[in-house]
Amino acid sequence: MGADAAPSSTSDHKPQGHPAIPPARTGVLLVNLGTPDAPEAGAVRRYLREFLSDERIVDLPRALWLPILHGIILNVRPAATARNYAKIWRTESNESPLRYYTREQAEKLGAAFSGVRVDWAMRYGNPSIASRLEAMKADGCERIVVIPLYPQYSATTTASVADAVFDAVKQMRWQPAIRMAPAYHDHPAYIEALAAVTRRHLDALDFEPERVILSYHGLPQRYFDLGDPYHCHCAKTSRLLREKMGWTQEFAPLAFQSKFGREKWLEPATDETITRLAEKGVKKLAVIMPGFMADCIETLEEIDIAGRETFMEAGGEAFTSIPCLNNSPEAISMLEMIARRETAGWV
């Protein structure tokens, strides 16, 4: 072969009759929690059945939990939850906000990170992690970085994604190499993105909040006692964001939302904090939810609708819910930094 001749690709050396093999690629898979396919009781029931059957979410003995789940919860909760989804559903694209923004994040990251296939999946619901990993592998992705879209680690979220990823890979004869991106609760780009989105929103208001609640999804206290680092990650994110914004802990208290069941959960509760601040004379309130990468039912219905009503009924006068990072330029830049770091040596 002459000095200027290009080497032959490996595909040129396949024996006759060899199965077609796509060129090797590296992939990035963004994974968020999940969403029903429609704001209807049947779709919500299917989603809740998968979600609440995960032992990472509810770790009670199956003999105790499954009769409650199938006998009570799945017969009572779907209709009410579907009505709440209907309040926030994006009718123009017929999808939940969580699905919309997760897809947008993947598309924008793919445009920014050329040479890498970027895809997205949901831990519960569609598109499933298994289906997207299969599609990526069929497209030649022999190395895949999975980025759980949970800034703060918890066994109920990040670890559950890892479970689903490796359950899917176990079914493959030719497995791709897998890297799981770690939590990014203290990543400088994440804190800066939160601050930028917050400043932009507050600057556009016609009032100045007297308090800003930092609200995170709750977790049973027992999980924290067993060693889950989630509370610590939330506390560190809150401290770093306060420092970036110049807020005191009194001005920006930490709280936890979305309590489910009778078990003791992390405290203080967001709804109780909203009421308490109003009763103490706070008239203008903002709530930011740093633990959610995309607006969803917990941010748009639970906080922006129900939380607003709670505050106003308790004597408040002005309320705002600060948007999640969503498809903001800062969010995409942060995801690109993480993706480039986690694909180091592969790309």
Image (cartoon, rainbow, N blue to C red):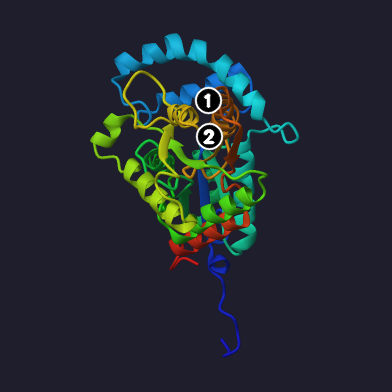
Q: CA distance from mark 2 to mark 1?
A: 8 Å
Q: Which mark is residue 34?
A: 2
Q: Residue at 39%, 12% (x, y): give it.
A: 68
Q: Amino acid at mark 1?
A: Tyr
Q: Which residue is mark 1?
A: 47
Q: Which corner quadrant of the image does residue 83 belong to? A: top right
Q: Is residue 245 above or below residue 272?
A: below
Q: Residue at 52%, 48% (x, y): give it.
A: 30
Residue 221 at what x, y percent from top left? Answer: 30, 31
Q: Which corner quadrant of the image does residue 109 belong to? A: bottom right
Query: Could you classify mark 2 by the number of other residues whose Cα lies within 10 Å: few (under 14), some (14-19), or many (20 or more)?
Result: many
Q: Is residue 50 above or below residue 133?
A: above
Q: Are marks 2 and 1 in contact (CB under 8 Å)?
A: yes
> Which is nearer the N-term, disc 2 or disc 1?
2
Residue 338 at what x, y percent from top left? Answer: 48, 59
Q: Nearer the viewer, residue 260 or 344?
A: 260
Residue 131: tell me if it is visible: yes
